[in-house]
Image (cartoon, grey):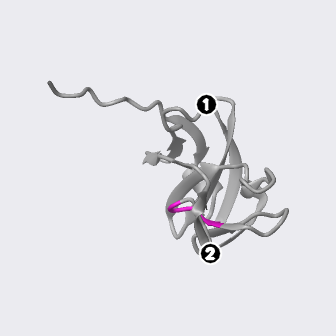
Amino acid sequence: MSQVPILQDFVTVAKVDEIPPGTGRTVDVKGVWIALFNVDGTFYAVDNACPHAGGPLGEGHLTGDMIECPWHGWSFSVRTGERRGNSNITVACCPVRIEGDCVQIALPPGFI
């Protein structure tokens, strides 16, 4: 018996041109704050809350694909969610897609 894939509900959160390469912002996806970043034209989304002390990753400094938390400097890859120097600590990543000129994010199952 084959499994039925879980359909994800994507939510439009921004227009592509609103987030230039090398920048990010915090967006609301179904009541959850998500940090959205544009890395050289590819969009990535991670949980906005840093696991160290809950700092707002969407307000951090983006260098390449690494976001640095503005509160205590912990850095995470927006591609994988892994913390620099300790891959055992991660932030959740969310699926992102582009539909026309819209950026859409879906929350992973069990995220809410």
Quarter of the figure with residue 58: bottom right
Q: Where the C terminus falls, by quadrant?
A: top right
- For the residue marked with disc 2, what is the amino acid? Gly
Dot 2 crowding, Cα within 10 Å, few <14, some 14–19, many 20+: few
Q: Residue furthest right?
A: 71
Q: At 83% from the left edge and 66% from the top edge, which residue is drawn?
A: 72
Quickly name the residue at label 2.
Answer: 85
Q: Residue 78 in magenta?
A: yes
Q: What residue is drawn where x is 73% and y is 67%?
A: 74
The residue at 67%/64% (across/down) is 23
Q: Nearer the viewer, residue 63 or 6?
A: 6
Helix, strand or loop under label 2: loop
Residue 48: image location, x then y, percent: 70, 49
Q: Is residue 84 left or right of residue 53?
A: left
Mark 1 residue element: loop
Q: Amino acid at mark 1?
A: Ile
- What range of the chain is rendered magenta? 76-80
Report whether 69 appears left or right of 47: right
Q: Is residue 55 above or below residue 83?
A: above
User: Is residue 84 rendered magenta in the image?
Assistant: no
Neighbour tally class for label 1: few under 14, some 14-19, many 20 plus, Cα within 10 Å: few
Q: Which residue is mark 1?
A: 112
In screen coordinates, is 3 left or right of 57? Answer: left
Alpha carbon distance from label 1 to label 2: 28 Å
